[in-house]
Image: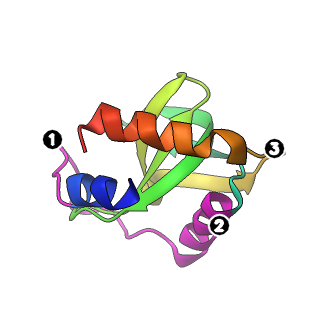
Amino acid sequence: MLCRLYRALDVRPSSYYRTDMPAAQTADLAQLHAAIADCRPVRFDYTDLAEQESSRSVLPLALVHPPQGVKLLAWCQKTEGYRQFFVRMMRGIAPEPGDFAQSRMALLQGLVEKEGA
């Protein structure tokens, strides 16, 4: 399933993205990789492409690397849906209590279906 997601999303261009944004920080990527491996929820503050700020709590599923920057694919608890977040636009990434290991495969399957991968 992950290979299908990577093939579908590592190359899909965003409809709009700023080219003057910095790259994702190594420490942020390390935290997200650990949370994905441990099936641990994370929270962070996020600024979207319209420069709207919000706080998010997500179940991190995968990281993809399209040309416009590394994105986290996740189940967003705030919107109760799958979302993509540019890692470079996240601030204050922190682990949250919990474990979603039991539902990880179902979440990944839902993401694959949503993305048509």
Give the image location of residue 105, x and y in percent: 55, 45
Residue 58 in sight here: yes
Kindly check if marks 3 and 1 are in contact, taking CB atoms under 8 A apart as contact.
no
Location of residue 63 by image quarter: bottom left
Secondary structure of residue under mark 1: loop
- Residue 7, compared with residue 97, is above or below; it is below
- Provide the residue span drawn in magenta: 11-37
Q: Residues within 10 Å of mark 3 (few under 14, many from 20)?
A: few
- Residue 70, compared with residue 60, is above or below; it is below
Q: Amino acid at mark 2?
A: Gln
Give the image location of residue 60, x and y in percent: 57, 49
Kindly check if marks 2 and 3 are in contact, taking CB atoms under 8 A apart as contact.
no
Magenta stretch containing residue 4, yes or no? no
Q: Earlier in the sequence, mark 2 or mark 1?
A: 1
In the drawing, what numbered circle is on residue 98?
Answer: 3
In the drawing, what numbered circle is on residue 86?
Answer: none
Location of residue 71 by image quarter: bottom left
Q: Nearer the viewer, mark 2 or mark 3?
A: 3
Outermost top residue: 79
Q: Earlier in the sequence, mark 3 or mark 1?
A: 1
Residue tagged 1 = 15
Q: Earlier in the sequence, mark 2 or mark 3?
A: 2
Q: Amino acid at mark 3?
A: Gly
Q: Residues within 10 Å of mark 2 (few under 14, many from 20)?
A: some
Residue tagged 2 = 31
Q: Residues within 10 Å of mark 1 (few under 14, many from 20)?
A: few
Residue that appears at 19% across and 47% down: 14
Image quadrant in which the C terminus is located: top left
Give the image location of residue 108, x and y in percent: 47, 44
